Amino acid sequence: MDLSKYIGKKIQSIKIAMIADNYLEYVEGKTWLSDVGIEFIFEDDTLASVFYDENTDSFGLYERTLDDHLDGVDHYLIDLDNNEFIESLSEKTIAKFEVKNQEIATHDYKGEVIESISLPVEYLIEFDDETKIQVASVTVKLRAEESEIANIYYNPEGNIWIALEEA
């Protein structure tokens, strides 16, 4: 998908969906770990980033709504009312869209590469005021005692890390 067509557009609203009863919010109002995905609503279009898409079998950004992706799946939306950053989005213009990919290879019994594919693991949306939204597919390891992040790394089959502003 050509994301350059979104440069110069303004995001009207954001939705973050969850399936699990509880979700992790690391920085209040700024950083979440979702088991489903996020939807960006534009004036005339919608982009959704989901953990899994039945058509592509992987994490990515798709020109469909979350409801389209989650048809028949019991889910709920995180309450984002009164989130100052999200409320300010209609005033911000997308200046840059960056995609980070990760090479995934399958090997034969000799260790030689049979097939290699490049999958997206991160989307970074930068606005004209240099604030950013990061959406990445990650695995997070926690320190059980403190419930703090011990390690975080890209994983095309991980959960979706969502960070607003400079979080």
Image (cartoon, rainbow, N blue to C red):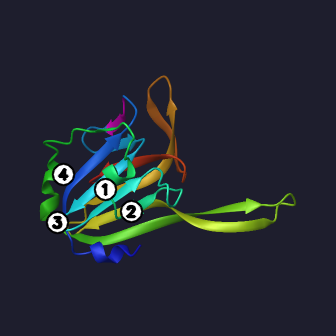
Q: Amino acid at mark 2?
A: Tyr
Q: Is residue 71 above or below residue 93?
A: above
- Range of the magenta residues? 22-26
The disc label shown at residue 56, or none: none
Cα separation, mark 3 vs mark 4, equals 18 Å
The answer to whether residue 167 shows anywhere in this view is no
Which residue, given by chain and number where applicable, does mark 2 sit on? Answer: 62
Which residue, given by chain and number where applicable, does mark 3 sit on? Answer: 43
Within-10-Å neighbours for mark 2: few <14, some 14–19, many 20+: some
Q: Name which residue lies at 33% across and 36% down.
A: 25
Specify the principal SS of the magenta part: strand
Within-10-Å neighbours for mark 4: few <14, some 14–19, many 20+: some
The disc label shown at residue 65, or none: 1
Cα separation, mark 3 vs mark 2, equals 16 Å
Pick whichever of labels 3 and 1 is earlier in the sequence.
3
Closest to the observer: 63 or 154? 63
Pick whichever of labels 4 and 2 is earlier in the sequence.
2
Which residue, given by chain and number where applicable, does mark 4 sit on? Answer: 85
